[in-house]
Image (cartoon, rainbow, N blue to C red):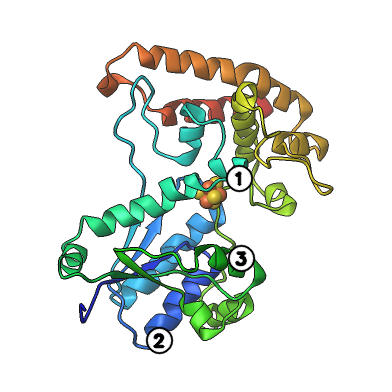
């Protein structure tokens, strides 16, 4: 039994995990480090909150790091560094659009676990037969209770998973109240802006540059989709399975702009990838360059 195992808090930049860390510290409980996994496509409001809470943690001497999945073997592809670039490179859609969760595993859990595993405190703990404590911010709401039920009983040889908000009986309102009491702004729900789990009103509040990229992702994936209609998977009474369809029907982007993206961008992207495939990996332009060019091009056209 290790007396003082490392304690890691997973900070997702949203309400729950923020409140969890604030209260954990207020109760004087041990915390070794706070880790945040950045997929590269969080909403702008979430990225605006990031430095606010980082400052709060720094002021209290809490070690914190942002970690990212860093692919190393690009085969014949241009290098990619975000979940969006991953989709445009070699994955039709994030796995959650197919009802799976490997996007979260790859872009969120794996980078955090990799960071922990590379550190001496965790290695020492494991060498002594102990387990690192990982704090997860699931609250008592029905949605988080479902996520918790899914994970309950999950046994790991390396980690002891703790759910402090559930130990304290806190729901989302209690979490928001705690953040407010700390004098901090309330963050929005953190998630990738192309996530299948987002609600209609969340999609409708996205800036146009995100909407255009959503259209692009679906257009690029379309030839390979067999079992799902688009990023939202399948149609419901409230919305279609394709986010592009919703963007079109609600006139969130002009129809001509949507058509131009669908007809032109995937072809241009394939050309970009073809050029990259003929070059040595170190000389290839990253996928980021193509995305920036795409953004600048559609911005010019719509001006
Ligand atoms: S927020 Fe959604 S799209 Fe992003 S990693 Fe999590 S499940 Fe996947």
Sequence-earlier tag: 3 or 2: 2
Determine if the C-beta at disc 1 is less than 8 A from ligand 1: no
Question: Which residue sits at x=24%, y=57%?
Answer: 117
* Residue 8, percent from left and from top: 33, 69
Q: Quadrant of residue 255?
A: top right
| Disc ID at residue 26 | 2
In the rendered image, the vertical position of residue 247 relative to residue 39, given as above or below: above
Give the spatial CA distance, label 1 vs label 2.
Answer: 38 Å
The residue to which callout 3 is attached is 146
* Left or right of 142, for residue 289: left
The quarter of the picture where the N terminus appears is bottom left
Q: Is residue 302 visible?
A: yes
Question: Which residue sits at x=54%, y=41%?
Answer: 95
Question: Which residue sits at x=49%, y=13%?
Answer: 271
* Left or right of 248, for residue 34: left
* Residue 73, percent from left and from top: 30, 30
Label 1 packing within 10 angstroms: few (<14), some (14-19), many (20+): few
Sequence-earlier tag: 3 or 1: 1
Determine if the C-beta at disc 2 is less than 8 A from ligand 1: no
The residue to which callout 1 is attached is 99
């Amino acid at each position: 039994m290790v007396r003082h195992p490392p304690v890691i808090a997973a900070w997702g930049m949203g309400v729950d995990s923020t409140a969890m860390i604030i209260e954990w510290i207020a109760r004087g409980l041990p915390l070794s480090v706070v880790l945040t996994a950045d997929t590269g496509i969080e909403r702008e409001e979430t990225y605006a909150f990031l430095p606010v809470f980082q400052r709060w943690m720094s002021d209290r001497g809490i070690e914190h790091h942002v970690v990212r999945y860093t692919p190393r073997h690009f085969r014949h592809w241009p290098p990619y560094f975000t979940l969006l670039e991953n989709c445009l490179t070699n994955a039709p859609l994030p796995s959650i659009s197919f009802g799976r969760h490997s996007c979260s595993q790859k872009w969120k859990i794996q980078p955090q676990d990799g960071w922990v595993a590379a550190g001496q405190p965790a290695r020492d703990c494991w060498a002594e037969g102990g387990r690192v404590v990982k704090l997860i911010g699931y609250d008592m709401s029905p949605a988080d209770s479902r996520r918790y039920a899914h994970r309950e009983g999950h046994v790991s040889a390396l980690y002891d998973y703790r759910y402090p908000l559930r130990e304290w009986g806190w729901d989302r309102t209690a979490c928001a109240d705690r953040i407010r009491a700390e004098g901090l702004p309330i963050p929005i729900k953190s998630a990738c802006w192309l996530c299948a789990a987002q609600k209609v009103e969340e999609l409708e509040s996205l800036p146009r540059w995100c909407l255009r990229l959503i259209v692009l992702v679906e257009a690029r994936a379309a030839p390979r989709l067999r079992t799902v209609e688009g990023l939202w998977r399948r149609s419901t009474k409230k919305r279609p399975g394709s986010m592009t369809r919703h963007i079109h029907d609600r006139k969130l982007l002009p129809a001509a702009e949507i058509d131009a993206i669908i007809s032109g961008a995937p072809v241009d992207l394939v050309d970009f990838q073809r050029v990259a495939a003929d070059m040595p990996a170190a000389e290839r332009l990253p996928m980021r360059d193509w995305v920036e060019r795409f953004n600048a091009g559609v911005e010019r056209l719509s001006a």
